[in-house]
Image (cartoon, rainbow, N blue to C red):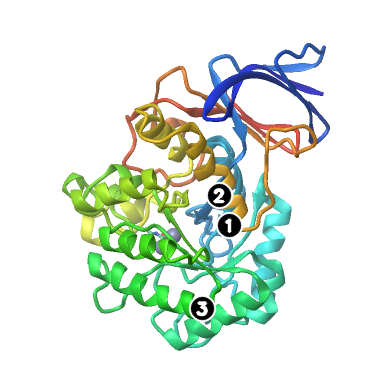
Amino acid sequence: MLLIKNGSIVKNNQLIKKDILIEDDLIKEVADEINFDCETIDAKGCLVMPGAVDVHVHFREPGFEKKETILTGTKAAAKGGFTAVMPMPNLNPFPDCYENLKVEMDIINKDSVIDCYPYATVTVAEKDEKMADINGVAKYVKAITDDGRGVNSLDILKHACYLAKKYNIIVASHAEDNVYKYDPKGEYVAVKREIEIAKETMCKYHFCHMSTKESFEYIKKAKADGYKNITCEVAPHHLLLSSDMIKDGNWKMNPPLRSKDDVNATVNALIDGTADMVASDHAPHTKEEKEVEYSKALNGIIGIETSIPLIYTYFVKTNKISLDRFMDLFVYNPNRIFNLGNRYLEKGYVADIAILDISNLHKYSVDEIVSKGKNTPFIGYELYGFNKCTIKDGKIIYKVN
Ligand code: DOR
Ligand code: ZN
Ligand code: ZN
């Protein structure tokens, strides 16, 4: 048995004091006060929530183990308060057929400390030339994507969407037009045409890391027209940083940091519900790959250890978004949209839990980073809401001493 005492859970937009008793892998009781002689976690001053979900992480294994592995990535996720993640398929081998996907799934089965749902690719080796063996992988994945680059072969994309519809899996899009590339236009031109494909095929279509004003306008309009199959995520860095703040390679990612106007539009999407979830696009790289001239640095920043405290501090604490919305963004929406099975802090549900310290400021330092990647622009930020304990299937998998 495991008891979480004196914490608060979110109910009807409010923090309500509750104790939570866990037996084996399940929540046994949630009540105003529980006393039981067993291992006890003091959650005074903390927000106790279902384990968070990040649908967009790069864990680099198989293929790029110097940057991250399934083990180090899932441990970093556990530190960040996440009990479910979806690793991206820009790997070696690319999970573009069952045989290649199995390489990744075997590592996940062996090493992952949390739930890990791998993406398969849309095209063979993400080359945008030939469709991947979606029929062969569909029953093992929740979603497919060519993240890292956009699919510009629209016939292939459409075919993939029809298959995704048939198998009830999501197509996730790194929307990027090959001509305009990193320009804002590169994103929204792709979003516009892909919305048409999503409407025609009616598959579940999810836009990754949306970052321009026009993209949100298109998505908002599609949603208002009733296309519930279209969803999107935003990343903390696009909500908090703009292009004028770029210092070095640790401020470089794709989509890149945008204008202040685009940042405002991203914030509005977070507030008005156009954004369905927050995802970090956790993208670790080695020191050698990042600590070089800006133009030579690889795209990507780590984010899974700071996603929750950044959103909590800048949007919940400041009352820009509600506590319910915070829960939707990190737990309920990703679980529902990606069909991951839901998690509630209620009797009978699996005990996947994060305990956030929302009472004390903590200064983020490079020494505490669990990920192999140290490439983040958020070092030195003082934030509320860092996770201090993660429980997965009833067992403590991360705890601050
Ligand atoms: O910044 C990024 N990093 N954007 C991507 O699309 C890919 C990712 C990576 O794999 O490093
Ligand atoms: Zn991407
Ligand atoms: Zn990505």
* Marker disc for residue 337: 1
Q: Which residue is mark 3?
A: 125
Location of mark 2 (residue): 333
Q: Nearer the viewer, mark 3 or mark 2?
A: 2
Residue 296 at x, y = what percent?
A: 25, 61
**In this view of the protein, can residue 298 be seen by the observer?**
no
Q: Is residue 113 left or right of residue 15?
A: right
Q: Secondary structure at mark 2?
A: helix
The answer to whether the residue bearing label 3 lies less than 8 angstroms from the nearest atom of ligand 1 is no
Residue 378, quarter of the rendered image: top left
> Residue, x 35% and y 53% (percent of image)?
288
Q: Earlier in the sequence, mark 3 or mark 1?
A: 3
For the residues labelled 3 and 2, the Cα–Cα distance comes to 30 Å
Dot 3 alpha-carbon crowd within 10 angstroms: few under 14, some 14 to 19, many 20 or more: many
Marks 1/2 in contact by CB < 8 Å: the verdict is yes
Out of 53 and 345, give the one closest to the viewer.
Answer: 345
- The amino acid beneath tag 3 is Ala
- For disc 1, the neighbor class at 10 Å (few under 14, some 14 to 19, many from 20) is many
Residue 198, relative to residue 256: is it above or below? below
What quarter of the picture does the N terminus occupy?
top right
Q: Amino acid at mark 2?
A: Asn
Q: Quadrant of the C terminus?
A: top right
Q: Residue furthest left?
A: 244
| Residue positioned 66% across, 19% down in the render | 18
Residue shown at 44% from the left, 47% from the top: 373
Residue 203 visible? The answer is: yes
Left or right of residue 337, residue 253 in this image: left
